[in-house]
Image (spheres, grey):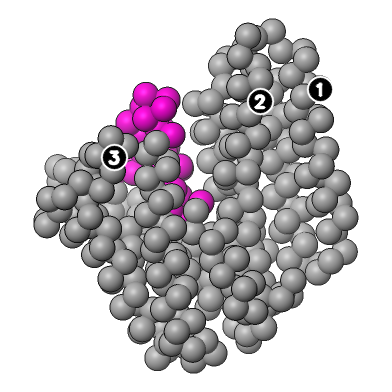
Amino acid sequence: MNRRILLLRSATGVVYVALVVLSIFLGPKWFAVLFFVFSLLSLMEYLRLALSPKEKLLHWLAIILGIGLYWLFTFLTFNSHSLKHSLIIWLFLMIPVLFSVSLFIKSIRVLSSMALTFLGIFYIIIPFALLNFIGSSTFSVINRPRMLLLSFFIFVWTNDTFAYLIGVNFGHHRLFERISPAKSWEGALGGILFTIMMGFLFSYLYKELTILQWIGMAFITSIFGIFGDLSESLIKRNFGIKDSGEALPGHGGFLDRFDSILFASPAIFCYLVLTELIIL
């Protein structure tokens, strides 16, 4: 990586980290709005890859359904169970609505396009929406859930950073060469190790969780972050592209930036529910 790209990547990363941390401390509503923007831009990026120009109707319908799904999940974090029936209705209607609209699209691949659209909504929108539950005081049993949300992002960033640094300097054994030739076992194990070390550090700084709970959260974030990264590489390989977009200098597209979070977020949500740190 040349110096210019490294500087661009670093500058973009600093702005991104600053926005996320600031939104967490400003409060849940600010965070929800920021990640609504991220989720919408990520979904639009995915749809540009998955759908043909003839399928604009399906494209815009997916955006409308995605927006509705995100905000129904998000308002649920502020209003407890008052919107759960609306969420269920929205989920149940998505398939018949997509099928009905597909009748008006003149394409021999309309069923596969509809499947890709449905996959995109669930792959992108739900993980972003679940982040709001992690930092929500409505469902959390701890006093400062925003610290839990902050720790999640720090674990993701630690894993990504050290997996990259160790992989570049010491990586010799390919992890999934047919999907992502650059990733190595050394990088993956390095990312996991340093993320667990970060979990140890949080166990001393924030004692509402036990040391085992912190280590569990760090380990799960790291493992699913790695699979999220690899899965996004699989998507790009399927579409025959190197980067999902060009919106973020030095990083590629929004999916390139958030690939780890898209898998780690649902995994950590389930972990927090199973450990009863979130009570639904």
Find numbered disc 2 in the image and state the secondary structure of the residue it sits on: helix
Q: Residue at x 28, y 71 (%)?
A: 194
Residue 193 against residue 254 in the figure, above or below: below
Q: How many dots with numbers?
A: 3
Image position of 65 (left or right of 246): right
Image coords of residue 99 (percent x, y) = 77, 24
Image coords of residue 96 (percent x, y) = 81, 30
Find numbered disc 1 in the image and state the secondary structure of the residue it sits on: helix
The image quadrant of residue 73 is bottom right
Can residue 184 be seen at all in this image of the molecule?
yes
Give the magenta-colored segment's residue range.
235-262
Q: Nearer the viewer, residue 55 or 266?
A: 266
Can residue 163 be seen at all in this image of the molecule?
no
Residue 15 against residue 194 in the figure, above or below: above
Q: Residue at x 11, y 56 (%)?
A: 169
Residue type indicated by callout 2: Met
Residue type indicated by callout 3: Ser
Image position of 50 (left or right of 75): left
Q: Read off the residue under disc 3.
A: 180
Q: Read off the residue under disc 2.
A: 114
Precedes in sequence: disc 2 or disc 1: 1
Image position of 41 (left or right of 71): left
